[in-house]
Amino acid sequence: MDTIAIHPPFTHFAIAFPLMLLIVHLFYMINKKELDSLHLILTFLSALAVVVATITGIIAHEPIEAKLEEIKAFGYHQKLGLLLALYFVILAIVRIIMTKTKALNLVFTILLLIGVVLLFIQGKLGGSIVYENMITPWLK
């Protein structure tokens, strides 16, 4: 199996699950609904998806590491990926603590919103690496 091809499918889950969690979370807040098992499952799936996307990114970059090192955006993409994996694990821990302390609801909301924005930035960086620096030059 081509290790480069394993990363892109997982990145889609790493964006979709946190975005879905944000939508569900905001819906619950607006409707003053208690956080339930769906919310908890989406939180864990979000953290897992971001961690797996990071791991597959590490695996996928090895065969083309020399090429990637020449691309300025790659360093930012790599560092942000590692940060996001840790960030979403911490977010999942905050969610577990929230079951005992309701006061963390606003903190969770702000952290989740920041996390989703950072994921979109990460996706933009990844897209620029592939489409502006790898595919486009091959087409010319």
Image (cartoon, rainbow, N blue to C red):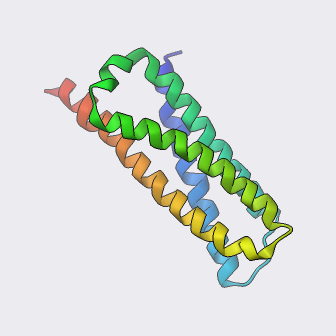
Q: Position of residue 46 (x, y in %)?
A: 65, 51
- Residue 70 relative to residue 93: left or right: left
Q: Is residue 20 visible?
A: yes
Relative to 69, is 48 above or below? below
Q: Nearer the viewer, residue 136 or 95?
A: 95
Q: Which of the image's four quarters has the N terminus?
A: top right
The answer to which image quadrant residue 73 occupies is: top left
Relative to 102, is 86 above or below? above
Residue at left offset 52%, top offset 36%: 9
Number of callouts: 0
Q: Which of the image's four quarters has the C terminus?
A: top left
Q: Most extreme residue toward the bottom, as rendered?
A: 31
Residue at left offset 44%, top offset 35%: 78
- Residue 37 relative to residue 137: left or right: right
Q: Position of residue 72 (x, y in %)?
A: 28, 35
Q: Most extreme residue toward the left, as rendered?
A: 140
